[in-house]
Amino acid sequence: MSNVICGQGRLGGRVTALLAARQLPLIPLRLDRDAGLINPAGPVPADIDRLLICLVPRHPDGGSGWTGLLNGLQRQLERGELRLRQVLLVSSTAVYESYEHGWVTASSPVTAASARSAGLIEAEQTARALTADSCIVRLAGITGPGYERYDPVAMSQQQPRHAIDVRAAAALIAELALRPAQAARTELITDGYIYFRQQRYPAQPSLPELATLAQQHRLMRPSLSAPELS
């Protein structure tokens, strides 16, 4: 059986390299919203053990690039053209946009508040329908090489910020992809901290400062925290 990745950007490329080093080479394929999986170099493998969707689709004006993105893939499976054991979808904490304050976790219900969050929520729902072994990975704002525009400390004056370094995110995604078959699951991943007014706090609801802050702002408690980079 084959292992496939859609998305070879700054995050997906790192995931591919990490898994190759662990003796799990990934076949890079394109994902088309109408045709599904496409292999420009030849046929698409019929039996896929792992499918990692690790990309950022272009967002059309007034809409979300995630809307309908997995429809073609779903039809391929329904027609019996593909067999899929596991899917891992890299999503975003933008799904929590409807929360104005309070703590959110991986199990918090999500409601669309914009075209972007609506598209992400739809993509997550479709990914769960593809196979019983689905993993949704909701990443906080990405920092590190190639993501210098997002600085959670400098941008934390008006509201709390959450973050994860791209290198740590790639390592966690690779670890999740290597885990044996499981039931459907959703992970909320940050670096384990909350940034506010240039201060850093562990994401612990018991902290008095955060208990007060959560009354006015949305705070995230991760299900998985990335290890700090040396």
Image (cartoon, helix red, strand yellow):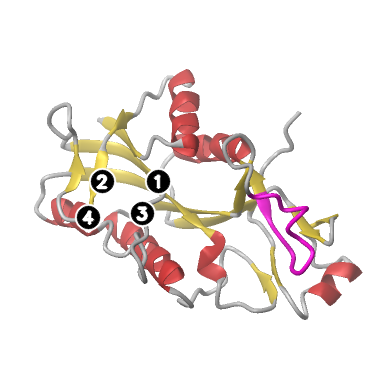
Q: Is residue 194 left or right of residue 58?
A: right
Number of dots carrying numbers: 4
Q: Which sits earlier in the primary sequence, circle 4 or circle 1?
A: 4
- Look at the image and give the residue range highlighted in magenta: 150-163
Image disc number at residue 58 = 3
Looking at the image, which residue is at 65% across and 79% down? 100
- The C terminus, quarter of image: top right
Magenta stretch: includes residue 160: yes
Labels 1 and 2 touching (C-beta < 8 A): yes
Q: Residues within 10 Å of mark 1 (few under 14, many from 20)?
A: some
Q: Quadrant of the N terminus?
A: top left
Q: Which image quadrant is residue 208 in? A: bottom right
Q: Main secondary structure of the magenta part?
A: loop
Which mark is drawn over residue 33? 4
Q: CA distance from mark 4 to mark 1?
A: 13 Å
1 or 2: tag closer to the N-terminus: 2
Choose between 67 and 78: the one closer to the eye.
Answer: 67
Residue position marked by numbered label 2 in the rendering: 31
The x, y position of residue 7, in whole percent, is 37, 40
Mark 3 and mark 4 lie on one chain; the one further toward the N terminus is: 4
| Residue 89 in view here | yes
Cα–Cα gap, marks 2 and 3: 13 Å
